[in-house]
Image (tube, rainbow, N blue to C red):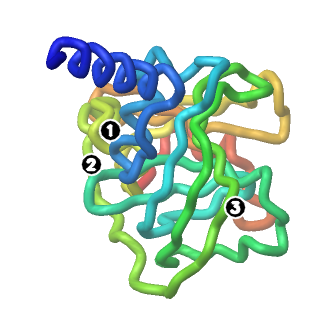
Amino acid sequence: MRWHLYAFLSFCLGLQSVLGGETIRTAADISRTLREDPTLFSTFSPRTFDVTGTNVQHLGLSFIFCDNTGYSQILTHTLPTNTLGLTAGDIVHASGKLVLGDRYKIPTAVCTKLAILRHETPPRTIAVSGPEFVSGRYDYRPVTLHGQAIDIVSDEIDSTSTFLILNCDGERIPCPARNFPAGTNAFNLVNAHIH
């Protein structure tokens, strides 16, 4: 009899993982699952998340989210735009699904419910070196870099997006070049030291 009970429980636990598994509760687990979970692309049921933490930065159709476990990016394109109003430091409760993105077919966290609970001080910016930046330990974290601008390029798909290529301690890092004062020619920044 015990053998039958064990087999039944094993079947149920295996079925739960195939059908989506437990709800994800942390930013670190969202990021890890998006990177590593091969069952994420199951057509049965996408993984769900239900998290509370800090909005680091609102990026239009997504926001950078952190809690005491780490950082992650969550898309908000399915929410009505008038419900967002996010500012850095907002403590939010977000829930949704981890799915394969419609446009680029990459794993993404898509928010279906979002509530701003209160406002606190946003996470502080951390100064990092080029090698630290490319290590992956600072993904989605607010950082500052110091380097020399060695080139400027336009995005091949979106010609309105311009990137400065910085040499930061031997690492070549593309940085979005936005919000220049009126009349500034970004090409004049080549060879400048940028912080």
Residue drawn at x 45%, y 51% is 194
Return the x and y of residue 106 as percentages of the image width and height. 63, 23
Q: CA distance from mark 2 to mark 1?
A: 6 Å
Is the residue 85 above or below the residue 52 in the image? below
Q: Which mark is residue 133?
A: 1
Give the amino acid type for the residue marked by disc 3 in the picture.
Asn
Residue drawn at x 39%, y 24% is 12
Which of discs 2 and 3 lies nearer the camera? The answer is 2
Whether residue 123 sits left or right of residue 152 in the image: it is left
Pick the front one: 48 or 166: 48
Badge 2 marks a residue whose secondary structure is: loop
- Can residue 2 be seen by looking at this rendering? yes
Q: CA distance from mark 3 to mark 1?
A: 22 Å
Q: Which mark is residue 179?
A: 3
Give the amino acid type for the residue marked by disc 2 in the picture.
Val
Give the amino acid type for the residue marked by disc 1 in the picture.
Phe
First along the sequence among labels 2 and 3: 2
> Quadrant location of residue 129?
top left
> Quadrant location of residue 104?
top right
Q: CA distance from mark 2 to mark 3?
A: 22 Å
Residue drawn at x 50%, y 67% is 55
Return the x and y of residue 35 as percentages of the image width and height. 43, 25
Residue drawn at x 69%, y 55% is 112
Circle 2 residue: 128
First along the sequence among labels 3 and 1: 1
Is the residue 134 above or below the residue 140 in the image? above
Badge 1 marks a residue whose secondary structure is: helix
Is the residue 40 above or below the residue 61 in the image? above
Pick the front one: 45 or 76: 45
Tag 2 and tag 1, C-beta contact below 8 Å = yes
First along the sequence among labels 2 and 1: 2
